[in-house]
Image (tube, rainbow, N blue to C red):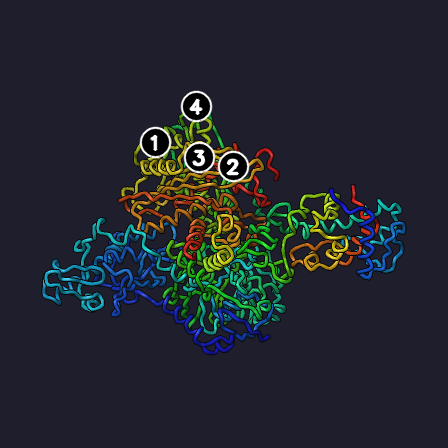
Amino acid sequence: MKLSIEVNGDRHDIDVDPETPLLWVLRDELRLTGTKYGCGVAQCGACTVHVDGRPRRACVAPVRSVVDKRVTTIEGVSGPTADAVRKAWVSIDVPQCGYCQSGQIMSAVALLTKIRRPSDEDIDHAMSGNICRCATYIRIRRAIHQAAGDAE
Amino acid sequence: MKSFSRNLWAATSLCVAIGLGCVVSCQRSRPPTSEPTWLPADRGLRSVADFAVISDDDERSRALFLEVAKVLQHDRCVNCHPAGERPLQRSGEPHQPLVVRGEDGFGAPGLGCDTCHGESSYLNMPGSPHWHLAPLEMAWEGKSARAICQQIQDPQRNGGKSPAELAQHMTHDELVAYGWAPPEQLEPAPGNQRLLGQLFQAWLDSGAVCPE
Amino acid sequence: MSETATRVGVGRRNFLVTSASLILGLTLAGKNAAAGGSPLTIVRGGDASPDLFIELRPDETVAITCHRSEMGQQIWTAMAQIIAEELEADWDRVRIVQAVGHPRYGDQNTDGSRSVRYNFHRLRVAGGALRTMLERAAAKRWKVAPSSCRAVLGKVTHPATKRSLSYGELAADARAQPIPAEGEIVLKKRADWRYIAKPVKSLTVPRIVRGEGTFGMDVQLPNMLVAVIARPPQVFGKLKSVDDSQTKQVSGVVETVTLDTPKPPAHFQPLGGVAVVARNTWAAIQGREMLELKWEEGPSANYDSETFAQELMAKVRKPGEVRRRRGDVAAALERAAETVAAEYYVPHLVHSPIEPPVATAKWDGDEVTCWACVQAPQAARKAVARACEIPEDNVTINVTWLGGGFGRKSKPDFVAEAALVARAVQAPVKLVWTREDELKHGYYHAVSAQRLEAGLDSEGRCVAFLHRTAFPVIGSTFEAGADQPSWGELRLGASDTPFAVPNLQLETGRADAHLRIGWLRSVANIYHAFAVQSFVAELAHAAGRDPKDYLLELIGPPRHVDPNDEGAEYDNYGSSIVEHPIDTARLAAVTTTAATMADWGRPLPKGHGLGIAAHRSFAAYVATVVEVAVDEAGRLTIVGVWSAMDAGTVVNTNHAHSQLEGGTLFGLSNALYGQITAKQGIVEQQNFPAWRVMRMNEAPRHMETTIIASDAPPGGVGEPPTPPAAPALTNAIFAACGLRVRRLPIFGPDRRDRLAVEGAKQ
């Protein structure tokens, strides 16, 4: 079935089953492989994207649900908050393997967009859905605090 | 506890019944016997008709609430009426990952319920429009049927809902409807939503007496 | 290519960018490595011929071939630091080329915490050799003495005449120079290092934060198909019948391929089953769900984890085979004023790298090229050759980035699967493991039972130390029926216990394996350190002593311990015991450092406790202190963690801290939640959170790490942080509330997260 979706500001006309998870449309059809598969059941957060600016696990979002909405992926996320997050991530060398970090960054940007100066508890509550098997949590937390300072 | 007075409660429910186009008589003294419109029993939830044999009004009212409570105390409902800040999942385990109620019941900033829960159940993921947690004062987790019964009649702890609004919520709310439309791996609540609505209304009509 | 682009309706530009970056990232490198004529083919660590690792490009970039796999340990950066240091390269011009799997690189198996440990000297020599050649080339050009020329940051200068030539300008001349012998190369002095032992920024992170870089899962080839496999529920189970008619109704499914059942031992063979091949991943996954499969049970169909735990524990309650002996433990136990005994159990664990195994294969005649997230590309090459019955030279293994490895990706069964399926469908195939596949068909960390007994004298000093261990062995994966713990497994925290006790004995019990047993980050150290370091705290408690003081007393005076002197066959992680001795002074030093960092002995709030553990593994020393709070309901909070590591010379100080942080939390995660169980030989955990790993809200908010400054040769870094984490945590729990956890995980599958303290509701 033909659908039209907007990803990172670009319109894409695709021919897929509307029940397909957004994750696999992004990865297999649009070749936007920055959004990762980690579990397929919304437990790990590696597939986090933004839909109309709100975080969304792409593995449990049917592509039909984002028609007429704005999808943003790690490749496209931009603006002062995203810049501050990337800068903090690089300056601290947060990632180890990096596979989960697209999702971590998308969640962190979503948090900082809502709360400019998040507390540790805010960070726990916003980031608990993103598993990092390398366990870079110490640095993710530090980087979010740093990005919060930089974004001001 | 602040509760509706029985009269007010009954009077209100009459309006509800009319408002809903319900044909049920709401006069307490007339037990609902052999009404052809009662929905049949369904998947562990009895029909209102099954309660007609109970002649004592209070006893019938209590029994009706216990039937309603089979749904209210079911995991599909209790999981989002938790006693703490964290919802439950599956058979009453703490929600994984950690998510919290947040200010408005829709989750924490940056990890709203809609991060995972869409407009309808999809794959393994439960869903419904406006997926969110009941406020803490409406917590049902770990509570007896009697406690829940008292709680939902207390405007301080039922979101300020009138009986009419409660009946409306039970019968038509989309999020309540989810209880019967979970993803495959989860057990649906007993019966169906219309049957719940009838039982709830019958309970109101019978005087809204709480079980012991 | 354009056909694919048209089919998915994406702009051609977009696709080309992706595929171009893929090709760039995976270029064959080292092809023209000096086969002969190099006097550096045998230096310590392997072949140090510069053209094996370094290419000077005309655009002044320095392409450094990394022959180890990048899986988050920042090995790209570390290898480049070592080479760039001795080469005097300009860091901003360093580019990484990932090596294919080939014996010319020597050992490429990126596990065992040995990338730097084995390659440090060798890569310094390679860099220093090319620097020497550049200086000689410049000297020749200028007709001056080579000793008057100096290579600095990408240029050779002649200070006397203020002339200089860039590396790019000198590249051709330098290549024409003979490769110097090791004795001719003057390695830089430690004091002159500009990259080594510095917090040089990661070469991968700037790409990661933009979603760039190619992981195994991200490989895309023109006309590529995607496959997932339905594997037998039990190892060596057989396919009885398959009905794929529903599968073929799924839009996008191309065909199904039946794979042969392997014969024991498992090795790195595919497990068999039915592959569903489709035009995209989702179609493959859906198609697999629609398969109607009937299986014949495998030989492990009676394997039940609960029963097995009891059987395993029974083994260590009886005397076992003695593997190390000092003095006379039996007599000393007899004479002891007090004896203490405790039994410990650690379940199966699984790697769960956040990127599951995945490999892509493309055939060209009887040659196959693979792209895969492998830790051991040479093993992958062998496994593919063996599975496809072709010569190894017909197999090319390109190594992508790894989304975590932890030992899983050194077992290349998935690459062999990709090659077999791609050959069957005569198209490039990406073979994807879902999370469920990864959890249910892994190479599991062995379940283990241990019993420790000690005798204390009237002063509470330990005079006898008996350690019995039993676990299904890794050897069973490679030799059917193997049931005897190997020296290689015992050296991981059992045969090398460095305690200053007069009587010490290690005994082992035999155990059958029912799952594929593999190795997971720090391997048997996980359970051995858990038991030994828990037991130390139990002895301290019995003796009425402070656990940190008691641990230091057991570590004893500064000395070198060699288990070979006491009947053990001890290979010291493949490193020389002279260069990397078991040095009790270093173990005591990290212990003291971690204790000081945590302010050990300070007054603690009610319900708080401190626990400590110290362990040497992979020729490095780590001590960790954990502070926990346990409330009356049994809720546990990890308040703080303090870890000190002595890994000898550390190439990247920042990234060593990262490993110390992550490796410690990895150990804490295992201890808190890690448990794989089997019923009827079938792994029960399907996905997260049935298999549970630590999340942000469960990680300590406070963690401090110290890397001990050291001139010693490099030890391991990736694995040593993990072993002491679990016992430090359980020791802290004991200190906080008196609950001694001897069976892991700490929290059971009910996920209520309550410790069994008085008043705690389960």
The answer to whether residue A41 is left or right of residue C704 is right
Q: Is residue C265 visible?
A: no
Looking at the image, is mark 1 or mark 2 earlier in the sequence?
Answer: 1
Q: Chain of mark 3?
A: C
Q: Do tag 1 and tag 2 residues touch (Cβ < 8 Å)?
A: no
Q: Is residue C220 above or below residue C727?
A: below
Q: Amino acid under label 2?
A: Val
- For the image, the number of numbered tags is 4
- Judging from the image, what secondary structure is the residue with disc 4 in? loop
Q: Is residue C109 above or below residue C582?
A: below
Q: Which mark is residue C467?
A: 3
- Residue C722 place in picture, x, y as percent: 42, 45
Looking at the image, is mark 3 or mark 1 earlier in the sequence?
Answer: 3
Categorize mark 4 by other alpha carbons within 10 Å: few (<14), some (14-19), many (20+): many
Q: Which residue is mark 1?
A: C556
Q: Is circle 4 on the same chain as circle 3? A: yes
Q: Which residue is mark 4?
A: C336
- Judging from the image, what secondary structure is the residue with disc 1 in? loop
Q: Nearer the viewer, mark 3 or mark 2?
A: 2
For the point 72% across and 52% down, the residue is B161
Quote the CA–CA distance across marks 4 and 2: 26 Å
Q: Is residue A53 above or below residue C548?
A: below
For the point 42% across and 35% down, the residue is C506
Q: Is residue C179 above or below residue C737?
A: below
